[in-house]
Image (cartoon, rainbow, N blue to C red):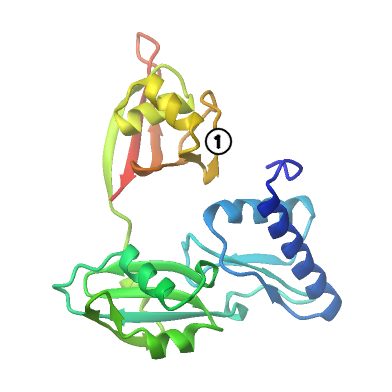
Amino acid sequence: MNLASVTEEEKLLLRRLGDLADLAAQRNTPRFSFFLSEGQLLLAQAFVEQNHIENAMFYGGYDGAARKACGFFPHYDDPEAGHFPITPLTLTFMKEKKLTHRDFLGSLMGLGIKRESVGDILASEGRCILFLLDSIAPFVMQELIKVGNTGVKCSQGFDAAHIPQPEFTTLSGTVSSLRLDSLVKLATGLSREKSAVLIRGGTVRHNHSETQNISQSFNVDDTLSIRGYGRFIVDAVGAPTRKGRLPVRILKYI
């Protein structure tokens, strides 16, 4: 990632990360960011790599977290997940109530909590696991008694066995080349021309970064997010057919 061509908002994040890294080195104590979105996470990872910061770590409260905080540690201190100021909470409710990620996020925002204070929200049948900054966890435990019209019970901690695994549907087809507009066409079922319009309109994020480059290449394990159509991951790219087309299989998050 080219850190020279970033937005003003991204520059603010980079300055904040630089301040945290300097404080950790000067005061010999760990410093942590707020929860980073997937796009911010890529930016932070590039910052750490390009500045050769060795004692940095990204963690979101459990293995496989999408939203993570960035921690900077003194040079003599090994980064550890247990040092991060993250509190997990488990909410339970009646299984008959079909509460979603959006329901829980909306209730948290309704309490005046900023999105950056909230990590992953893992909703499943009768249960939701929240990962929060330590600073807001006690407030949430006290105040979050309903989500929508559904009563919830809150307890600190979580059982790793209750981490829901992502579910997918499979989409397969062939593309003429490994270009982003071809991938969007396969994911949406639209024509290649309409897929290009989506990309140029800023509704597509490739590997968590917005792009308007229709000819940008893609490969296996790349992620794709299309506003109004969902999130996808490239699962496989096969050998060219006799007509020179490439078989592609993608997974759509349910």
Looking at the rendered structure, the kind of residue marked 1 is Thr
What residue appears at the point 43 percent right and 84 percent down from the top-left corner? 140
Place residue 233 in its image quadrant: top left
Q: Secondary structure at mark 1?
A: loop
Q: Is residue 218 above or below residue 21?
A: above
Q: Is residue 41 above or below residue 154?
A: above
Query: Left or right: 49 with respect to 170?
Result: right
Outermost residue to the right: 26
147 to 102, vertically: above or below:
below
Relative image position of residue 65 (x, y in whole percent)? 47, 63
Q: Where does the image place residue 198, in percent across and percent down from the top left?
A: 43, 31
Residue drawn at x 49%, y 71% as measured from the top left? 118
Classify 93 as above or below 115: below
Q: Nearer the viewer, residue 9 or 224?
A: 9
Q: Position of residue 41 (x, y in %)?
A: 59, 56
Front-most of residues 240 and 121: 121
Residue behind mark 1: 211
> In front: 249, or 19?
19
Give the total of numbered labels. 1
Left or right relative to 71: residue 142? left
Q: To which quarter of the image does residue 31 belong?
A: bottom right
Q: Going by the picture, which residue comes out furthest to the top?
A: 243
The residue at 70%/65% (across/down) is 56
